[in-house]
Amino acid sequence: MDVCAISPSLTSQVSSSQMTSAHQLRAPRFCLALVVAIAGFAAACSRQTPELPSNNDPATVHELLVGSDGVQFLAEISKYDWPDNGAKAAGYFMWIKRDATSGDGRTAVRAGETAHVIASFLADNRNDLEGISHGFLGLQHSSVGEINPDLVSAYASALTPYQVSMADDDAVDGFKPLGDLAASRDVFVVIATGRDAGTQFIDSAYERAAGVAADAARQACTGQEQSTSSGAKAIQTAATLSGLAAAAASSANIPTKNSHQAMDDILYAMASACVPVAETPIEGQILDYVEGRRLLTPDEIVQQRNAGLEDYYQSQRDYLYTRGLDISGFVDWYASAKGS
């Protein structure tokens, strides 16, 4: 029955003295609500299953994503409520992490270019991906990580090799800079909508932050030629990567480190890398925490010596400073990356 079509005829049969203003307004309002509901139902019913390529070899996927339809393809497969949690679609990206570290330049560049399209898509569409309409009449709103956790896991795997690039804004093997920290932060936050993928992505970011800092310390302490600015850049990258990880964790209510905890971890990573290889004698308060050529771990200090860690970390900060590694800007860099 066409309710909207009947309303005018009913109105003409009732005298104005018999119909109140409320009755006159009720039918149009009901019609409008019905039209909106039907439109929503039609949109939900018309959403078709995205068409996936006939094969998922790297060349095919790369050509699709870097082409003019690449972003539209990612949007379709990301916003569709797959019955398998996006597992089949995820299979099209599992090669990227492997090829990112390939010794063959063309293979590595192909992986980097493909990953860059994914990262740019996530950064540009954060709001949409955090509130995807699905379900009956599209009345449900969930994040991409909630409706397609397997697909988000594949995105995380593909982007993990490029976490440092997203923090230091340096291009690497086809993965170009995203433009600013806000874009990188958006990528991290979207990945964190998938609880498991987000946790792994965040953990990896902290590990890579420590690795970047440790490499810089190792070079400085073995006498390898390294400018003060390059050491500072490594520390800034570590702080930025830690801040991005914290932003993602906070958005998803995943337990994480505050700025001082993150800085302490970086201090230990650098000092523990430096002590065993230092070409000059180890001096200062840090000697209290060294056995042989090994820096004692935080757990050893607490458990074996029943001591606090404030002096322990300060000794590392002082020691690294004598090696030209100043970590004083860490907290500010971390805060800038984490954002508000």
Image (cartoon, rainbow, N blue to C red):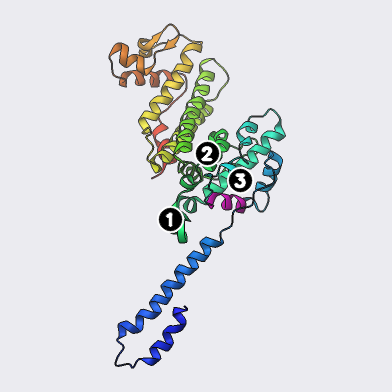
Question: Gap between marks 2 and 1, in whole Å?
Answer: 22 Å
Q: Which mark is residue 140?
A: 1
Q: Amino acid at mark 1?
A: Gln
Report the magenta residues as a range. 71-80
Q: Main secondary structure of the magenta part?
A: helix
Q: Which picture quadrant has residue 322? A: top left
Q: Nearer the viewer, mark 3 or mark 1?
A: 1
Q: Amino acid at mark 2?
A: Ser
Q: Residue at x 65, y 47 (%)?
A: 65
Measure the C-alpha gap from mark 2 to mark 3. Answer: 16 Å
Residue 298: x %, y % from top left = 36, 18
Q: Which residue is mark 2?
A: 153
Identity of the amino acid at label 3? Answer: Val
Q: Which mark is residue 20?
A: none
> Is residue 16 part of the magenta span, yes or no?
no
Q: Secondary structure at mark 3?
A: helix
* Residue 117: image tag: 3
